[in-house]
Amino acid sequence: MQKKIRTKDLVEKIEKLSRSKMATQTIVELNQFRELKKKLEPKVVLVVEDDEAMRSAMKKILESLGHVVKVASDATQLSTVLDDNPIDLIILDIGLPWVDGFELGQLLKEHQDLKKIPLIYVSGQFTEIDMKKAFEIGAEEFIKKPFDLNKFKTIVETQLKGTN
């Protein structure tokens, strides 16, 4: 019978070894340091989107930026993706089944552990009323689908910079 590998211990050993080797290296430029830190401590982004193609696209975009991505197709799946690991950013579709994005956003912003996490709403529908409601709930951004790829990346990175 094989012994179960404890990945947490392995990750900690790798990080410790990496840090000790980094300590003996010559001084690096600030941008090099930021890139290395990003690899060692990736940000975690939660995407709640019911459209499978859009959910998959956002996941690939965010992973290409070096982030860990948790996905859910609706509010009922949150229990399977929310765990003890912290979330740094939430991207939430408005048009979700069962519990819509506004209702879910309100619940998330009322939760003690989640209320300070930046929230970005995305929607294929765009009305001034929707945008106003999103910001009243506590959203930092509102993105209309389909979105410009570079603008999406910029908005995400801007929001994540404030989550040190």
Image (cartoon, rainbow, N blue to C red):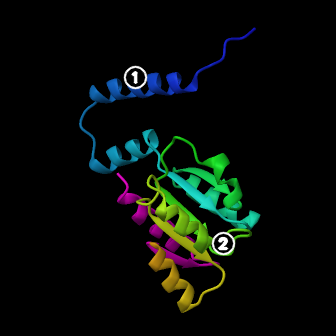
Residue 38 pos. (x, y %): 42, 46
The reply to whether the magenta stretch includes residue 157 is yes
Q: Which residue is mark 1?
A: 17
> Mark 1 and mark 2: span between their CA atoms?
45 Å
User: How many marks on residues?
Assistant: 2
Quick check: 115 left or right of 4?
left
> The magenta stretch spans which residues?
139-164
Q: Are marks 1 and 2 in contact (CB under 8 Å)?
A: no
The reply to whether the magenta stretch includes residue 123 is no
Q: Which residue is mark 2?
A: 100
Quadrant for the N terminus, please.
top right
Residue located at (45% from left, 22% from top): 13
Q: Is residue 5 above or below residue 97?
A: above
Of the two numbered discs 1 and 2 in the rendering, the one whose residue sits closer to the viewer: 2
In terms of depth relative to the viewer, which is nearer, 103 or 118? Answer: 103
SS at mark 2 in the image: loop
